[in-house]
């Protein structure tokens, strides 16, 4: 990657401490998503975590069927089905993040910075959190 390309793709560099432009649309999505989060508050964190694992399983099941049936991964119906399931995952991620008091944009920015550092260090491949 050409130096500065990641910044170009994500938006302007804001400052050294917060390298990437905030992905504020995620925060807007999170605010709207939590208005539809109807579950007992004593089940905060637990409910969305269980929902996320269920929806991630549905994504995996659809992908498994692509492999099994040899379906064209660009099939419009398949793309719509997968998009719906991924959207359900996003909803659970948004409300889970809200339950622990963190913005989706912060999660996204922290993750991108982590991946960028791994790429710079040549440790993007491999396993383990501390690479």
Image (cartoon, rainbow, N blue to C red):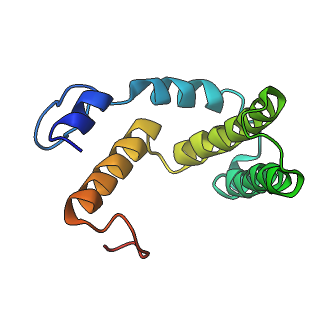
Query: Residue 41: percent from the left, percent from the top?
Result: 69, 47
Q: Quadrant of residue 61?
A: bottom right
Q: Quadrant of residue 121?
A: bottom left
Q: Is residue 107 above or below residue 28?
A: below
Residue nearest the observer in this picture, 97 or 113: 113
**Left or right: 8 with respect to 37?**
left
**Left or right: 107 with respect to 84?**
left
The image quadrant where one finds the N terminus is: top left
Taking the spot 66% from the left edge, 26% from the top edge, the residue there is: 35
Query: Residue 77: percent from the left, percent from the top?
Result: 83, 29
Taking the spot 40% from the left edge, 26% from the top edge, the residue there is: 24
Give the farthest residue toward the left.
16
The image quadrant where one finds the C terminus is: bottom left
Give the farthest residue toward the right.
69
Residue nearest the observer in this picture, 34 or 83: 83
**Left or right: 24 with respect to 52?**
left
Residue nearest the observer in this picture, 80 or 46: 80
């Amino acid at each position: 990657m050409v130096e500065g390309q990641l910044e170009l793709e994500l938006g302007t560099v804001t400052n050294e401490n917060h390298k990437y432009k905030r992905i504020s649309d995620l925060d807007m999505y999170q605010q709207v998503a939590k208005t539809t989060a109807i579950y007992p508050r004593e089940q905060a964190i637990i409910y969305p975590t269980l929902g996320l694992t269920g929806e991630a399983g549905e994504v995996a099941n659809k992908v498994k069927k692509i492999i099994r049936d040899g379906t064209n991964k660009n099939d419009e119906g398949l793309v719509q089905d997968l998009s719906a399931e991924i959207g359900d995952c996003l909803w659970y991620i948004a409300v889970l993040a809200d339950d622990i008091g963190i913005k989706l944009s912060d999660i996204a920015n922290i993750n991108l910075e982590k991946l960028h550092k791994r790429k710079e260090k040549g440790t993007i491949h491999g396993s383990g959190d501390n690479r």
